[in-house]
Amino acid sequence: MKDIYIFTNSYPYTKSVEVFFEDEIKVASQTGCKIFIIPTNKDKDIREIPENITLLPCLTEIGILNKIILFLIMPFHKKFWTMLKGAGTTKRIFHGTKYLYGAYMTRFYIRKTIKTPAILYSYWFSYTALGMALAKEDNDVIQKSTLISRGHGYDVFSDARNIYIPHRNFTLSMIDALYPVSDAGTNYLSMLYPEHSAKITTRRLGIKPIRPCSRELEQRTISFVSCSSVIKLKRVDLIMSMIKQFSENHKNMEVTWTHFGGGAMFSQVKQACENIPANMKVNLNGFTNSNEIHKLYSEKGYDIFINLSTTEGIPVSIMEAISAGIPVIATDVGGNCEIVGAETGKLVPLNVKYEDFNAAVDYIIANHGTLKISATKFFNSSYNADKNYTEFYREIQDISNKR
């Protein structure tokens, strides 16, 4: 087996970002592969990793002098000027420059660190993937290595978020495989880069199963739950507004909404919750450890999970909900349609109106018992971490062995 070097955004130096990588690395640690983690950023928080996983120095710890040199030589490279040509706006030039600089740092790090052929794995299809591609241009060791990348949300649908990630066609030409986590991502990138479509294959994420709560749906009470950062694209304020209107229209019901997660708009949402109907109760929990959330899903239980984001890959939060047998209402964006359907809940339009939301709630209430069972079955067949990650690491080793 070849060694595997994984470039993460910050894991394990993180409190809430990239925590969904934790289940993958736990399964990977049991496959017999020798694995090294290279975080690109470092935070004060650090999560525990399996003993047989090696944590290497952070990408940003290459030294201030090297950083300055890399930045200063960028304008002398052809790829810098082709990046500028393809950018257009000032905002896109900023994004492009930032990502290209990150790619040069990644290339420098790879040249200094990896001395024998290995598997290089970028967890995001962004600047670390581009850096691997750049390293392959003129490095014999990397040319004999296997280069792969995952693709999630922003790094796949970057145009939808007005993020410019340069040289994607070049990156695809140099890596061996790209694995979007959703069919929506695979189809989108295959359409943009048809000449590389054979390299682009969906490989789903997964989580460890969560024990469903035995509590059944009760008459005249309903509990909603949501879990995300409280930022603009997650539209937590819209979730609150929908549930508030539902409470006003169902005064004979006790309505509870629980949200896990904090962010820039947390205070705004909290303030809006000061004016709610008497039959509505709100629990804004801020950041909550995933283990605690899973425990509450199993012990307390919730009736309906809600996600009204404007864009998504396939949310781990929805995987958690269906694993625990909680039916889901979600906007029909990104890969949501691949995890929310007849077996797991109800999709609503991106520009959701209250009538759409209310109809979805009515549907789930009417079919709650059936959905609770079928959601768990769907999870086990599609998003179980042990199954998905064991197959994934076997596949990337097979690709490497065929080189």
Image (tube, helix red, strand yellow):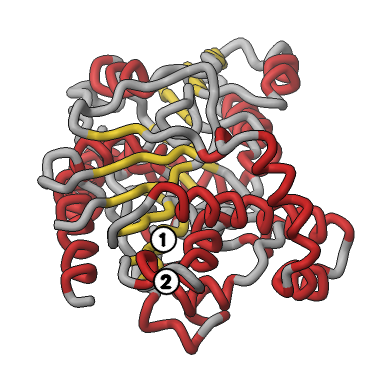
Residue 8 location in percent, x, y?
45, 43
How packed mark 2 is, by other alpha carbons closer than 10 Å (few <14, some 14-19, many 20 or more), is many
Q: Specify whether 176 is left or right of 323.
A: right
Kindly report the distance in space between the C-alpha atoms of the residues bearing marks 1 and 2.
8 Å
Residue depicted at 84% across the width and 55% down the height: 91
Q: Residue at x 46, y 38 (%)?
A: 39
Is residue 95 at all visible to an observer of this figure?
yes
State which quarter of the image contains the C terminus.
bottom left
Question: Which type of secondary structure does the marked residue at label 2 adopt?
Answer: loop
Q: Nearer the viewer, residue 381 or 163?
A: 163
Question: In x, y percent, where is residue 262?
Answer: 59, 22
Q: Residue 149 has which mark?
A: 1
Q: Is residue 263 above or below residue 281?
A: below
Q: Position of residue 353 (x, y in %)?
A: 66, 48
Which of 275/12 is in front? 12
Q: What type is the residue that disc 1 sits on?
A: Ser
Count every numbered label the image shows and give the total.
Answer: 2
Label of residue 175 in the image = 2
